[in-house]
Image (cartoon, rainbow, N blue to C red):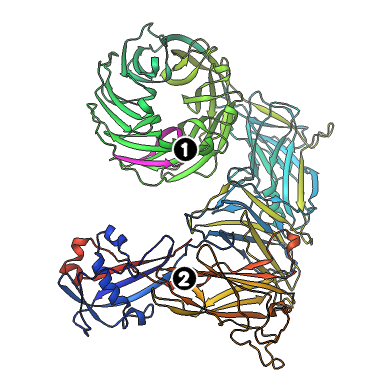
Amino acid sequence: MRRESGQALILVLILLAVGALLLVPTLELTTTVLKSRQMYGQFIKEDYAMDAANEYGLWRVLWEPGYAASLPIGQESDPFTVTINGITVNTTITAQATEALSGVSLVKDHQIKPTKTVTPNTASPGVPTTFTYTITMQRLEPDDAVFDPLEEVIDALPAGFVYVPDSSVLDGVPFADDDLTILKEPVIVQPLNTLPWSRIVDEDAMVANAPPPEQNYGTALTMKVSSGIPTSNETNARVFLKVDISSIPAGAVIQSANLTLWAKEYPEVARTYDLHRVTANWTETSIHWNNQPGIAASATASARTPSDNSTPMKWEVRNDIQAWLDGVTTNYGWRISDAAETFGTENFTDTVIDALEFDALRGKTPAIIPISGDIYAIAYGGNGDHGYLKTVQIAASGQITDTVIDTLEFDTQRGLEADLINVSGDIYAIAYRGGGDDGFLKTVEITSSGNITDTVIDTLEFDTLRGLEPDIINVSGDIYAIAYRGDGDDGFLKTVEITSSGNITDTVIDTLEFDTLRGKTPAIIPISGDIYAIAYGGDGDDGFLKTVQIASNGQITDTVIDSLEFDPLKGLEPDIINVSGDIYAIAYRGDGDDGFLATVEIASNGQITDAVIDTLEFDTLQGKTPAIVPLSSGTFVIAYWGDGDDGFLETVAITPSGRICQTLLESPEFDTVRGKSPDIINISGDVYAIAYTGGPTNSDHGYLKTVDIVLSNYVNHITEFRSKDDDSSNTEPELVVSYIPLGGSDFQKITWRFDPPLDFTYGQKRTLSFQARAVLPDNSRHWNAVELQPDGSWTGLTANITVGTPSDNGTAGAGIRVTKTSDTPIVYAGVPTIVTYVISITNIDIGGFDRLDAIEDYLPPGFSYVVGSASAAWPDLNSTDNPQYPYNIGDFEPEVTPQPDGRLKLKWHRQESANGFFPGVELLHDYPMPQGVTYTQTFQALADVDVSGSYQNEVIVKLKDWNKYGDRGIGDKNFYSWPTGTVIVPAYDLLSETELSALRTNAALTGTGIEVKSWHWKKHK
């Protein structure tokens, strides 16, 4: 039987060896010609399980009269005998059917089917209740159909319901309001009235560990937050604040809440201040350092000190206010403290020690590594973009010998973006972008004195299509991993073998395409054991971090372990380094080409914490190609290509928890003319070497400089905030809130906009959930509806919430429900069969309405309407007063119109009744439809098909002059059934669980039996 794409039904047939039981005629499976209409063996022959003749023979067993044609699904057959290649077994067969998704091209433009549920679906009257709505969206169009990705989800909340900010979750993952690349937070199209509320804090006080720590500062006019420093007893200071929110109405939905503090003066460098919720009571007149209350483990919010003293600091505290209002937690106020206490700023001085122009023609993207003692090697793209390797001598004091020790042109065509690594002893490997932009790996010999052997030891072209920006690391022993940007700019990871003598195995061990969209400038780092992390510029040049598993033998697990988009705007040229434990720092070129530093958490098993810990924009003008190395405990130095293409250094401090503290560097420019693509390493103590592309403007010479970076002093940075007791300038600490009270009668229409549009694979289900709050009256119902754009599909009124015992059973504005059933769920291929269909249309609204305008039914390909088979029933008219109802067969014949895709459109609408009961042109459907009435339209179709599949119908019912929900801006007058009335046409493709040689042996046939699996396929347009 021909099978086509779109899986619809899985039938599992198990041939069980049962011994010598009741015998039926033996069927010899030999050379009978295959009937392709009933059986298609391509899948089997591809898997070398059975030939076509055997398939046809087994088809006869399954489908000829007396066997499968009379064998219900799930029932075991009588015993029968099968002979394969002279081996005979007595077997029985059981057909088991499990219906799965069907690939269909829909008549309507709807491609994604939405459904919606709500939890809880009941509520107590007059009690504020939070409801969780879940919208499930499934693509029903097959993969080869033209598909319009999802642009918007529009939800019309019931009257009085209020959306809870930041409650949306897509596919189980929460997302922030400002995450515009995935989803914007709902835009309130018809907002409820938002009410303002503000209040000066009721209590505030500072606590400090400076002697005496028992000092109370509750009446002071100012309050300090300070960082302290590790080398002395200088003060850590914190601020406590409390505000009474009892005047905000109970149950209100907080839309925003900000705590604002004004400062007399901020520190010279930016500090991060954390705001934590306090967990025990305190008073401003008695609190001090030694009796201060505890705080919540996680900070509610963080804010960085501004540079302008006239700018206040603000913390977003909406979640805390909502929790206090709802009684989830108790209002004991907040504590504000430096995120890096006892971690005051380190001030550094830096001095250029020496310089060497190691290539006066060109020195692009140099990479420098130590060789032995004071000998170092630099690999780079030299004149003509050829690949060069040079050795130099740098003393521990930073003095550079005036001349290069030795030179090797390791690639005479191209040798760009080289990365250099020691293999063993004097053997080194260079991964680089070579000729044709392919990926190359070469091994060379460099002695401890800096002499380079004149010839390359071995070469491997590890990617013959593309191999840009490679980064190579050792995995274990002779195994190395290379992360790079490959074909199509995708991200690739490959493993190779390099022996200690420099010989490279001729083939790559394993490959993983870790990003199928883009993988620019990847940097790979070991995490723990066989776990590695790759930071890179991904789709849209956004910053991505992924973890992978590489075994010690070079085998790469086929899937990425975890992923984090660490910068949704830009994250190019990242360099990643371990800070402490599971904390890592990534320096990169971010939005506007500025220099950014972000910290993240990566567990030893590769799981990445979902959010970035902290971020610092270390250069607001330009920060290209940053390279970060440790400076001292908890401090790091970043060399980068800065403003004016000059070479810059920046020092930062990072706490073990990942908080970033800015530091001061006296002279940040190591080259005031040009400093592109720097690579920095430590030489000894405070001395560092920087290899970079420098020279006069518009030149790309190769330069090497050494610098001395020395800690000069620590600074305890202090912010002095104004307290509530300083009312002289209207700068008291203040809480400003906006909220929506519950109990109103207005409604919200919410729109989630996807940018870029959200794509679906065939059959994929995606979920969008969110929360809404309401206080509901007794004996009421509350519906909800969702529409998807651009295709306009919608749920109808659904996700009902019931309060008490409403007087009616309908749903206001729901309209009708359309369903369709078939009396023959299974039809056999090539066997013409009559199928009886019943379309049911039920008024699920409150009260009656006018009127049905038309019914359209779309029969699947291969089905034809049986003329004169239509009948109708309308219970309201089928009464003793109208004994001639239900109508006779033929009363209402449809218009029959063939469709381009092979379907048949049946349309019932205005036409004269055949029995003359309605002699005019008004259709029975034009009669009013009372609440609860179900109208049925029955007809028959002849199914004559030879292609297996799940044949489904679609029904569209059009209402006349009905617009109960049009004021909500969603929905459709045309009520749609979605694919329904399924008729299954089974087929069998035989797939053995064993290989061919094993299948055709006594052991295979007389042991545990033969398991045969069958796929049932759906034809689509």
Residue at 42% in and 70% down: 98
Residue situated in front as seen by the camera: 132 or 927:
927
Give, as a single range, the part of the protein colored magenta.
Answer: 509-529
> Residue 524 at x, y = what percent?
41, 34
Residue matched to label 2: 862
Q: Is residue 527 magenta?
A: yes
Q: Quadrant of residue 776?
A: bottom right
12 relative to 861 in the view: left or right: left
Residue 816: percent from left, percent from top:
67, 72
Residue tagged by mark 1? 518
- Disc 2: CA contacts within 10 A as few (<14), some (14-19) or many (>=20): some
Q: Main secondary structure of the magenta part?
A: strand
Distance (Cα) linking label 1 and label 2: 45 Å
Left or right, 604 with respect to 717, comes to left
Element class at badge 1: loop
Residue depicted at x 35% and y 75%: 95
Q: Identify the amino acid type marked 1.
A: Arg
Is 291 displayed left or right of 47 in the figure? right
Residue 381 appears anywhere in the view: no
Q: Are marks 1 and 2 in contact (CB under 8 Å)?
A: no
Residue 540 seen by the camera: yes
For the N terminus, which image quadrant?
A: bottom left
Query: Camera-side residue: 479 or 655?
Result: 479
**Would you place residue 101 above or below residue 592 in this image?**
below
Circle 2: residue type: Gly
Residue 652's place in the image compared with 132, above or below, is above
Foreground residue among 89 and 429: 89
Q: Which mark is residue 898?
A: none
Residue under the point 56% across and 75% down: 820
User: Percent position (x, y) of residue 585?
Assistant: 49, 33
* Sequence order check, earlier mark of 1 and 2: 1
